[in-house]
Image (spheres, rainbow, N blue to C red):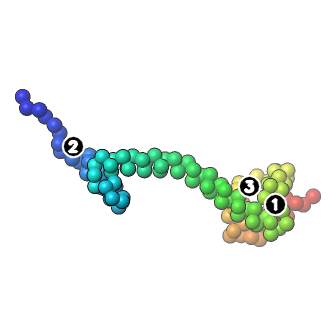
Amino acid sequence: MPRSVNSVASRARRKKILKLTRGYFGSRKNVWTVAKNAWEKGQLYAYRDRKRKKGHFRALWIQRINAAARLEGLSYSKLMGLLAKENIKINRKVLADLAVNHPDAFKAVVKRATAK
């Protein structure tokens, strides 16, 4: 009995990966083993960086809040401490959006936090 190899499926599997690696540099786009390794490594980076993205955005929000707080004469840590003390529950994402897009609302939040 002749040896049976499913070359249709094998070729389709290879073509799928080679299609995904289009645009890569050098042999990473057209040599099967190199392309497969490059694509797999790219998937690992994508997974890792989806997690890192969250930390990058948090850092961006903190920088924006800090810059706006400095204009009000406070540091970021003092502002966050005052907000916690006054039991004002507003997350960094919303606070950063207020600081950038609605400075009057941000000033009102700061005023409410510093009022005694």
Residue 56 quadrant: bottom right
Q: Position of residue 29 (x, y in %)?
A: 31, 56
Residue on which the image places disc 3: 90
Find the distance from the CA under tag 1 to the CA under tag 2.
Answer: 61 Å
Residue kind at label 3, given as amino acid type? Ile
Residue on which the image places disc 2: 9
Q: Is residue 39 left or right of residue 65?
A: left
Vertical comparison of 34 with 60: above or below: above
Q: Earlier in the sequence, mark 1 or mark 2?
A: 2
The tag on residue 75 is 1
The residue that appears at 75% across and 62% down in the rendered structure is: 66
Among all residues in the image, which is located at the extreme right? Answer: 116
Q: Earlier in the sequence, mark 3 or mark 2?
A: 2
Mark whose residue sits in front, 3 or 2:
2
The residue that appears at 6% across and 28% down in the rendered structure is: 1
Q: Nearer the viewer, residue 39 or 92?
A: 39
Find the distance from the CA under tag 3 to the CA under tag 2.
Answer: 54 Å
Q: Earlier in the sequence, mark 1 or mark 3?
A: 1
Neighbourhood count class around disc 1 (C-alpha, 10 Å): few under 14, some 14–19, many 20 upward: some
Vertical comparison of 65 with 44: above or below: below
Residue kind at label 2, given as amino acid type? Ala
Q: Nearer the viewer, residue 77 or 113?
A: 77
* Mark 2, secondary structure of its residue: helix
What is the count of numbered marks?
3
Q: Is residue 85 left or right of residue 105?
A: right
Q: Position of residue 44 (x, y in %)?
A: 46, 46
Neighbourhood count class around disc 3 (C-alpha, 10 Å): few under 14, some 14–19, many 20 upward: few
**Residue 12 in view here:** yes
